[in-house]
């Protein structure tokens, strides 16, 4: 394996000595995690550590309207949050040693919806969607919380939709990479019809892995459901990395830490 040398100055008390870092001259896949509405990056940190152990550089972040910017919760729009995702993607891409040809984006619920749209605006190789949400294209700049009042989301999400009718589905139809689509068996927030629409939209992807987590709810509030999703995600990423480096045998899947936090949903997604 080729290596690179990087000179470094080491400070010792009042003096300095010269050193040299020697590291593999290789790029690493980048993985961006996008949390759902009402969540935070903390829900993905344990999974990010697990995926990083596979040989990836991972980035988690908080969408505006959440965590430290909770004050914007009632006013932030999909337009603003998509800009958050774009900024996070660009930050990941600028990270030293990240391979721009090997970027994965993993999102849940609202984060999955935004991740799907991202594929139409940035280069993505792998797309992981868990219980992705759907929204009407109208009202794009409206506060996200107002959508449930101004739009019949329950009815909309129960319909069979053509990819051309929805921005996220249209992005999936044009996505040529690999897709992981995960359903929760007892999801009371995202109906099965939404998963069917995403599944049909991804028909032209390079590969589509569809899994249902038995007994799981939308927020994966059960510890077993957390572990099942974490194992599923890391196993899929292991397979994707092995396919990219077909000359290297795929290693064992890495189960995420039990410290992974439940993605408990708000009343609406």
Image (tube, helix red, strand yellow):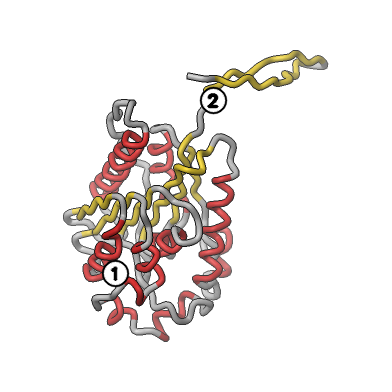
Q: Which mark is residue 25?
A: 2
Q: Secondary structure at mark 1?
A: loop
- Can see residue 199? yes
Residue positioned 60% across, 44% down in the render = 94
- Can see residue 36? no
Residue 44 on image: x %, y %: 42, 48
Quarter residue 156 falls in = bottom left
Judged left or right of residue 264, residue 210 is left
Quarter residue 95 falls in = top right
Judged left or right of residue 70, residue 166 is left
Query: Quadrant of the image for the C terminus?
Result: bottom left
Number of residue marks:
2
Q: Which residue is mark 1?
A: 189
Residue 25 on image: x %, y %: 54, 25
Q: Residues within 10 Å of mark 2 (few under 14, many from 20)?
A: few
Q: Which mark is residue 263?
A: none
Judged left or right of residue 110, residue 7 is right
Q: Nearer the viewer, residue 181 or 145?
A: 181
Residue 235 on image: x %, y %: 28, 39
Q: Earlier in the sequence, mark 1 or mark 2?
A: 2
- The mark lying in front, picked from 1 and 2, is 2
From this view, report whether residue 159 is shown above or below residue 259: below
Q: Residues within 10 Å of mark 1 (few under 14, many from 20)?
A: many
Q: Secondary structure at mark 2?
A: loop
Residue positioned 23% across, 71% down in the render = 193
Residue 187 on image: x %, y %: 24, 64
């Amino acid at each position: 394996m080729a290596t690179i040398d990087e000179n470094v100055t080491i400070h010792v008390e009042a003096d300095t000595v010269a050193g040299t870092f020697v590291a593999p001259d290789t790029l690493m896949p980048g993985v961006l995690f996008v949390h759902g509405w009402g969540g935070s990056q903390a829900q993905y940190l344990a999974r990010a550590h697990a995926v990083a152990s596979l040989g990836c550089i991972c980035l988690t972040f908080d969408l505006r309207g959440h965590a430290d910017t909770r004050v914007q919760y009632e006013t932030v729009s999909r337009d603003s949050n998509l800009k958050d995702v774009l900024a996070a993607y660009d930050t990941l891409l600028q990270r030293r040693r990240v391979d721009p040809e090997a970027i994965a984006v993993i999102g849940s619920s609202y984060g999955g919806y935004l991740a799907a749209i991202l594929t139409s605006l940035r280069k993505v190789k792998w797309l992981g969607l868990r219980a992705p949400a759907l929204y009407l294209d109208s009202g794009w700049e409206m506060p996200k919380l107002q959508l449930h009042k101004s739009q019949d989301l329950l009815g909309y999400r129960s319909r069979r939709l053509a990819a051309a009718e929805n921005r996220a589905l249209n992005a999936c139809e044009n996505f040529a990479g690999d897709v992981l689509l995960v359903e929760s068996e007892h999801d009371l927030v995202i109906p099965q019809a939404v998963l069917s629409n995403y599944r049909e939209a991804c028909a032209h992807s390079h590969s589509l892995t569809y899994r249902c987590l038995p007994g799981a709810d939308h927020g994966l509030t059960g510890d077993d459901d957390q572990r099942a999703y974490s194992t599923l995600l890391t196993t899929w990423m292991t397979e994707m990395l092995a396919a990219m480096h077909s000359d290297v045998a795929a290693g064992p899947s890495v189960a995420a830490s039990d410290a992974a936090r439940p993605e408990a949903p708000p009343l609406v997604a």
